[in-house]
Amino acid sequence: EATLSLCVAEHIKPSPPLKDFLIKQIQQFGPLRLDAYMHLCLLHPQWGYYQHPTPIGTKGAFTTAPEISQMFGEILGGWVSDLCHRTHSSIPTLDLIELGPGRGTLMADLLKQKSVKIKKVHLVEQNINLRKQQEKVLTSSQKNLVWHTHLTDCLDQLSNPFILIANEFLDALPIRQFQKTPKGWKERLITTTDGETLALALEASSSLWLQDLGQEGGVLEICIQAEQLIHDLCNALEKNGGAALFIDYGAQDLRNKPTLQALKNHQHIPVLESPGESDLTAHVNFGRLKKVAQEFSSLKIYPLITQREFLLSLGLQQRANQLSKASPSHKAALDAAVQRLTHSNSMGNLFKIPGIKHGFLTRQGGCSPKPFDSLNLALSKGDDPKNVLHNQKTALGILEFPSANFYGLKQLHGPIVHEIERVDKKEKLEGDALITERPQTVLNIVTADCVPVLITSLDGKIIGAAHAGWRGALFGIIKNTVQALKRKTNTPLVAAIGPCIHQKSYEVSPEVYASFTQNAPNNTQFFIPSLKTSNHYLFNLPDFVKTQLEYFGIKEIDQINHNTYENQDMFFSCRRAFHRNESTFGCQGSLIVKTKE
């Protein structure tokens, strides 16, 4: 006879959250280095972010490029296929490695390419839940799958040439931060001020081993783990042969630029706010990694290029056209995907305010024919209204907010500001700026050389969008927009200035010069004499607009440094069209939306 005994434990205290664990560690052992904090936040076996069942995608903190469109993986599949063909072998001889495969989406789309002939696929993944998702997605297309916890485990087993792909992997590796002080570089550490709150502090002594020059107050980020990874990888490439491709956020040189950030539910939050519940990343210093790779003289290191250049050179637009032709109903979604994959630097990377999405769009990714090709958002230039409506839907898709209400203006180059709460959706608005406290309401400004300005309060309660040509700037559109916003909130405002015409391309008449300087001599700082035309001047309109924003109280201003006149492939330009005797032109959009109350 079997006996079942039940043991009931009372008053079991639940496991403490990661924040409590970190505070106890600091109280017991002293301040934490930033790389230790990142490692625990992301990979703690119980409370780390990457132990969550769904850290990626709509239910996670962020969305990666493979989740945006199948085209991303297909394009990389073409790149891998080309490398396979170069082996001149009738049987698969290359192994394929992916670091941080996520849900397996990239690898699944890549392996759809029938010309990809791979001997074995290695997936470097620590999250057990993601491994299960990868196995479910990939076993139908690839039987020879091997999982590894660390890259070194994988490299130790290799004897064949291999191809390694890492998409948004390096930016999640833990970093250390050092701040330049009058007494030298000091490391940033995590401490606690009251036993309840995490805070940043500087170490007491200087880090004498740092020889890097920098400005006082500047921050240097070093990722020792990434440098070791590149060293191990290059050693294996030199031994076995092959290639590696890294796609990530970063730059050639990141000195004096702190980039560590936290994402939770697709919104930026303070880095110390929700340990274990948010994704932590830092931009990759490709310059430092290149120096490590250069120690291996037999390897060829290719120059750093943008994701846009890489994908378009491998046929992304042609692939989108093929898919659109096969399924016309999906054209808007495909156009939006191309825009997001190739113009991420123009989307939502300026001010980081929870509940706010914004973007400065280019002319690419729409349906309008020449001369409006192709993402024209202006109704007043002669484009078919059906095309403009289609492009508006594409723009909403780029913002990932397709259900929002879309508001625009008949722009007049004047000082008029409209508040959306006070107008009916059907009313045709005339003016040069919009503001709103209403959620799910997209404000859109169109430009083709003039300065687009997007503004929000730091608490995300109110947003604004302004169009500033020289007349509007002179007549007070910036002043009126800022004051209209300030009447609604006491919270500080932040602003972003989008692509516009630059001083070297913007020659103005002596009458324009006089209208700005006659009663305001300080405005002469924005003009220099033209070397091309007598008595004419080159006007720095974006600097004038920025100075106006500062004068009326906005201290935090970001700016996209693109000259619309010079870059024909990316932007419409009124002045360029005039110089070429073209009768009309399109306009790109600048959009901002408040996603929630």
Image (tube, rainbow, N blue to C red):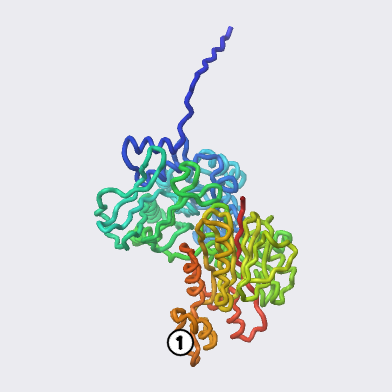
Residue reaching furthest to the bottom: 534
Is residue 260 something that shows in the picture? yes
Q: Which residue is mark 1?
A: 529
Q: Vertical placement of 318 versus 48: above or below? A: below
**Whole-percent x, y for residue 405 in the image:** 69, 58
**Whole-percent x, y for residue 308 in the image:** 54, 65
- Residue pictured at 42% horizontal, 36% vertical: 20
Front-most of 191 and 103? 191
Q: Is residue 97 left or right of residue 223?
A: right
Is residue 445 something that shows in the picture? no
Q: Vertical placement of 61 versus 306: above or below? A: above
Q: Secondary structure at mark 1?
A: strand
Give the position of the N terminus as an image quadrant: top right
**Whole-percent x, y for residue 463 in the image:** 58, 60
How dense is the environment of label 1, judged by Cα within 10 Å: few (below 14), some, or many (20 and up)? some
Q: Vertical placement of 475 versus 317: above or below? A: below
- Residue pictured at 52% horizontal, 47% vertical: 264
- Tell me the kind of residue under disc 1: Pro
- Residue pictured at 52% horizontal, 63% vertical: 495
Front-most of 23 and 387? 23
Residue reaching furthest to the top: 1
Front-most of 569 and 230? 569
**Whole-percent x, y for residue 568 in the image:** 57, 76
